[in-house]
Image (cartoon, helix red, strand yellow):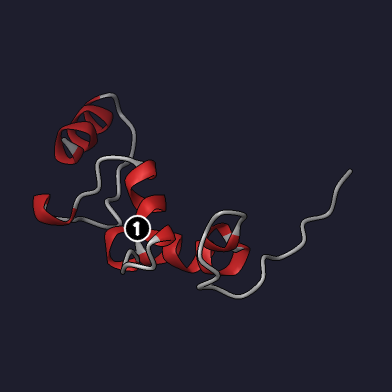
Amino acid sequence: MGEEKARRMSDLGYQVQILWRRDMASRVTSGTALRDMMRRNEPWHHLVPPAVAAYVEKVGFAARPGMNQTVAAATELPHD
């Protein structure tokens, strides 16, 4: 599916650069499945691009209420 999307975007004249590929065995079908893995303290980093895993660790999505506290405390974001 990803290769098809890249081809379609390229056909429309957009410059396409694929930053990360995964095989069918490592695909997660939903964010819910990924969050469930986090809750169960199962490995999940390998299922997302490295930049996404780093961002989740930094911002603390895995440490939000209901999740196992497997990452550092969430970064406080300023409120307007």
Return the residue nearer the eye: 48 or 18. Answer: 48
Counting from the top left corner in percent of width and height, residue 49 is at: 34, 60
- Where residue 2 appears, as percent x and y from the top left, is 20, 39
**Residue at 77 percent of width and 56 percent of height:** 77
Against 29, residue 60 (above or below) is: below
Q: Amino acid at mark 1?
A: Met
Q: Is residue 13 above or below residue 23?
A: above
> In screen coordinates, is 41 left or right of 78?
left
Task: Judge the density around disc 1: few (<14), some (14-19), many (≥20) Cα neighbours within 10 Å.
Answer: some
Say which quadrant the C terminus sits in.
top right
In the picture provided, is 39 more to the left or to the right than 49? right
**Left or right, 60 with reference to 10:** right
**x, y percentage for residue 79?**
86, 48
Instruction: Residue under label 1, please give it.
Output: 37
Q: Secondary structure at mark 1?
A: helix
Left-right relation of 57 to 31: right
Image quarter in which the N terminus is found: top left
| Residue displayed at 32% across by 40% down | 30
Residue drawn 28% across the image and 30% down it: 9
